[in-house]
Image: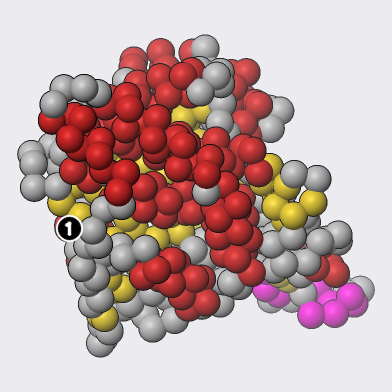
Amino acid sequence: MRHAIVWQVLSPVKPPPVYSLATQLAEGRTDMSDVKKQLAQWIDDDRDTIVEFLCGFVRAKSPNPPGDTTLAAAHVTRFLEAHGLPFRTIAPQATMPNIVGSFDTGKPGHHLVLNGHMDVFPADAQAEGWTHDPWGGAIANGKIYGRGVADMKAGTSASIFTFRYLHRVREYLKGKLTLTAVSDEETFGPWGTRYLMEHHPEVHGDCCLNGEPSSPLTIRFGEKGPFWLKFTLRTKGAHGAYTHLSPSATKQAARLIVDLEELTMLRPSVPIDIADALAGAAAAIDEAQGPGAKDIVQRVTLNIGVIHGGVKVNMVPGTCWFEADIRVPPGLGKEEILAGIREIVARYPEATFEEINYSPPSVCDPNHEMMGILRANAKALGRPDPTPIVSLGGTDARLWRQRGIPALVHGPFPRGMAQADEHVEIEEFLHVVRMHVLSSFDYLSR
């Protein structure tokens, strides 16, 4: 397959006059806290610009499927170009570009990677009952509305502005900062972060910070793994009045689905540091992911996302198939799930199954340096100490953890995610921007 890669590198621009700070630092008349104050002041001063960037990002439609993110990518690259920031576009699939920006300070230190996706779920305004245009980026009652504003254009915007502001203060940093604004995340596709991680090791870094919708009250250090399978049941079929001649494929499918619930009884073996981190997190898990989330975060769950069977009401169906989404908690693996599936399917000679997709559950050190930095900055900003948790849903952060690289997720609440009137509160969004900017600065200035 041809890989279309377009490189675009912009020369760094001269820092603005604010860098009288450099002289002050050199002469010992100030310290890093002054730079952090300047960063916070820039965010406050640029409030309207940051909000309008996100509104415009929402208006740049990028539903997946079909996955075309060219409008969203153009919105991002226009911003990067306008601010003289270095980046390149890597597009192994022409309609699914990935934007990678990076700068090296020339001093030894950490390599932090900022990651966010540009594709979003589809939206049907009429069928879903939206009261705002899902692609309008409207502001009402202190909130920004639109498909993907929470998942995850707000978080990706936080990454982009972090890259912008830290580039301005790069002379005070050590190591390297990389921005990855990617496509093809919503379907776990091959052309986004997966492609970059496999073909561009320069984006690996030694830590990843991601702004997926989560909650300002939590920091996700791990997530459950999705295991998607297709089950098919085939029988002879018959006339609807002749039920004695053939089993019904739809009835057999229904029975199989009920039996597959047995998988939820499997119990993981969780490392002690993970267990300790989750022990006191029940309230925060429910607050961030909905009441009852704490009860399933360490359990296997089963969802039948698609089912199809039968041709006509007065025929005994000869074929029925369904797709199952099994979420595997840390401490359990694919083979343990498959063993349970094989034992259950063996009860149904009409049934076969095939794997669609699997990504293992992932965790990193819940006591990593960046975890402490994020928690300290939340408290310094007058917010509650965010709780380390494991996520129910999947993110691209898993791709770093699966390579042994710590990856943390800290973003806005998932209000309306994949539902009508998805939105973020403006003040909450700006808080996430502050958290990413200040924490990234701390990580790269030590």
Percent from the top left, x then y, of residue 441?
30, 36
Q: From the viewer's perspective, is residue 63 above or below residue 94?
A: above
Magenta residues? Answer: 311-322
Q: From the viewer's perspective, is residue 223 above or below residue 146?
A: above
Percent from the top left, x then y, of residue 124?
76, 69
Q: Residue at x 69, y 62 (%)?
A: 137
State the count of labels: 1
| Residue sticking out furthest to the bottom | 2
Percent from the top left, x then y, of residue 305?
65, 57
Q: From the viewer's perspective, is residue 294 above or below residue 263?
A: above
Q: Residue at x 31, y 78 (%)?
A: 92
- Image quadrant where one finds the N terminus: bottom left
Res. 337 image quadrant: top left
- Helix or strand or loop: what does disc 1 sit on? helix
Which residue is under mark 1? Answer: 201
| Mark 1 crowdedness (10 Å alpha carbons): few <14, some 14-19, many ≥20 | few
Left or right: where 9 falls relative to 181 = left
Q: Is residue 200 magenta?
A: no
Amino acid at pointer 1: Pro
- Tell me if residue 305 can be seen: no
Q: Is residue 318 magenta?
A: yes
- Tell me if residue 390 can be seen: yes
Q: Residue at x 16, y 38 (%)?
A: 174
User: Between residues 397 and 27, which one lies in front from this camera angle?
Assistant: 27
- Image quadrant where one finds the C terminus: top left
User: Between residues 56 and 406, which one lies in front from this camera angle?
Assistant: 56
Q: Residue at x 33, y 17 (%)?
A: 273
User: Between residues 221 and 72, which one lies in front from this camera angle?
Assistant: 72
User: Between residues 13 and 145, which one lies in front from this camera angle?
Assistant: 13
Left or right: where 297 falls relative to 81 = right
Left or right: where 4 falls relative to 145 = left
